[in-house]
Image (tube, grey):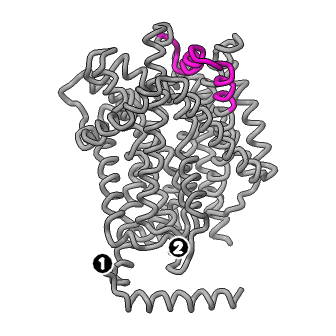
Amino acid sequence: MNQRNKNFSSVFTYASIIVGILVLLGAIFPDQFGTYSGAIGAWITEAFGWYYMTLFTLILIFCIFLGFSPIGKLKLGKPTEKPEFNTISWLTMLFSAGMGIGLVFYGSSEPISHYLAPPTADAETKAALAEAMRSTFLHYGFHPWAVYGIVALALAYSQFRKGEVGLISKTLRPVLGNKVDGPIGNIVDVLAVFATIIGVAVSLGVGAMQINGGLNYLFGIPNNIFVQGIIIAIVTVLFLYSAWSGLSKGIQYLSNLNMILAGLLFIAILILGPTLLILNMVPSATGDYLSTLIFSSLDVAPLNEQKHEWMQSWTIYYWGWWMSWSPFVGIFIARVSRGRSIREFILAVLFVPTIVSIFWFSAFGLTGIEAGQSVPQLFELPPETQLFGIFNELPISIILSIIALVLISSFFITSADSATFVLGMQTAFGTLHPKNFVKIVWGLSLSAIAYVLLLSGGETGLDALQSAAIISALPFSVVVILMAVAFYKDANQERKYLGLTLTPNKKRMKEYMDETRSQDDHDNSKE
C-alpha cells in the first residue's frame, strides 16, 4: 500500500506541476507561449521529420510481422479465457475509438486543403484530387493505428496475461526489470500523462473551434477566443458532472449516440453528395493509397521544397498528434480486447478503422470539393466553418448542421470524460476506480490546456495546437519503442516455451493449459 501511495503521489504531483506551469505561462504570456512553442515545434519537424516517418513505418511493419508470426497465436489473457465482448460489439467499439472530433473537423477540410495546395501536383487539377485523397488516407490509415495497436498490445499483454497493473511503465518490466517500480517508472508514467493531456487537449481545442464555427455560420454568433472559452466551460461542466457522478451508462449511451449520428451523417452525405463519384473513387483511391504506401511511408521529400513544407504542416503534425493520443486510445483498446488472440487483435485494429476512414473521407472530401467547384467561396472559409458551408449547398442543410453540432459536442464530452478516467488511472497506480478529486483535477487541466493553446494559437487557432502535439510526442516516442521491444522479448520467450510455430507443440500446449486451469482453480478456491 505504501508503494501504491508513493507512486500515486509522485506521478500525480509531478504531472500536475508540469501542467500547471504550462497553463500559467500560456495564460500570462500567450503570445510568447505561442511563439516559443511554434519555434520548438518547427525545429522538431525539421530535425526529426525523418525520425517520425521511419518510426511509424517500422511500427507498422512490426505489427504486420506479429499478425503473421507464431506470436499471433497467443491470447491477451489466459489461454482458457474467452473474449469479454462479442465480435460485433468489439468491432463497434474499435469503430467508436476511430471516430472522433478530428474526423468531423477534417472530414471535408483536409481533402479540400490538399486539393487547393497539393504536395506535388498543380492545384485544383485531377492529379491534385488524387493526391488529396491519397494523402488523407495516409494520415488516417494504417500508420496511426499501428502505433495505437502497439501501445494497446503491450498494455493488454502485460495486464491480462502477466498480471501487471494497467500502467504504461509496467509494460517495460522485461527490459527495465524492477526499475519500473521506482523513479524511472514514474518518469515513464509522467511522460504518458503529459502526452495524453496534450493529445486530448488538441482534440478539445479543435472541437471548440468547430462548434463555434458552426454557431457562427448558422446563427451569427461571433467566432472568437471568448466564445470558444465559453463553449469549453459549458462542456467542461457537463463532462465533470459525469466524471463526478460516475455516470458510466450515460457515457455508454453517448458513445452509441456518436455512432448513430456519425452513421446518419455519412449516409446522408453519400446520398445527397456525388454518390457515383464517391463509389467510384473509394476503390480507385484505395488502390492508389496501397500502391504508393511504401514510398509515402518513408518519403521525407529532402529534394522537393514544396512537398517538404507540406509534410511539416500535415504528415509530421499528424504523426505527432497520433503519438500523443496513443496512451489514451491504447488504454481504451486494451481494455475492450481481453481474451482476443494477438493475430485477431492486430488485423481488427489495423483494418477496421482504416476502412471506416476511407469511406468517411471519400464521402465528405469529394462532396466538399465538388461543392467548392460550384461555389468557390466555400474554399475560402476557415476549416472550422467549411463543413457547415458545404451543408448549406445540400438539401436539409439545417438538419445536417444540427446533427454535426450535436455529434461534435457529444464527441467532446465523451473524449474528455474518458480522458479524465484514463489520467486518473495512470496517476493512481492503475486503479480502475480513481478518486473523484483526481478526475476533477485532470478534467480542469484538460480544459485549461485546450483554452491556453487556442489563446496562443495565432490567427488560425491551429498553430499552437499543432506545435503542442509535435512537442509532446517526441519524448513519448522513446517509450513506445521500449514498449515494442519489451513486448516482443516477453511474448517471444513465451512462444518458445510453448513451442509455438506454424505447427505448434500440442503436447506442451496441453501441459501449459492444464497448469493454467489448476492455477485458476486454486485462485478461485482462495476467493
Tag 1, which secondary structure?
loop
- Check disc 2 and report the residue beneath it: 77
Give me the residue at 31% from left, 31% from top: 46
Q: What range of the chain is rendered magenta?
A: 380-406
Q: Is residue 381 magenta?
A: yes
* Residue 235 in sight: yes
The 10 Å Cα crowd at callout 2, few under 14, some 14 to 19, many 20 or more, is many
* Residue 471 in sight: no
| Residue 129 percent location from the top left of the image | 34, 23
Q: Is residue 258 magenta?
A: no
Report the number of numbered marks. Answer: 2
Give me the residue at 69% from left, 89% from top: 526
| Residue 205 percent location from the top left of the image | 59, 30
Left or right of 188? Residue 500 is left
Q: Quadrant of residue 236?
A: top right
Tag 2, which secondary structure?
loop
- Check disc 1 and report the residue beneath it: 501
Left or right of 299? Residue 413 is right
The C terminus sits in image quarter: bottom right
Give me the residue at 54% from left, 55% from top: 91
The 10 Å Cα crowd at callout 1, few under 14, some 14 to 19, many 20 or more, is few
Quote the CA–CA distance across marks 2 and 1. 19 Å
Q: Nearer the viewer, mark 2 or mark 1?
A: 1
Farthest front residue in view: 276
| Residue 255 percent location from the top left of the image | 67, 46
In the displayed structure, would residue 244 be above or below residue 85? above
Q: Disc 2 residue type? A: Gly
Relative depth, front residue between 272 and 5:
272
The N terminus sits in image quarter: bottom right
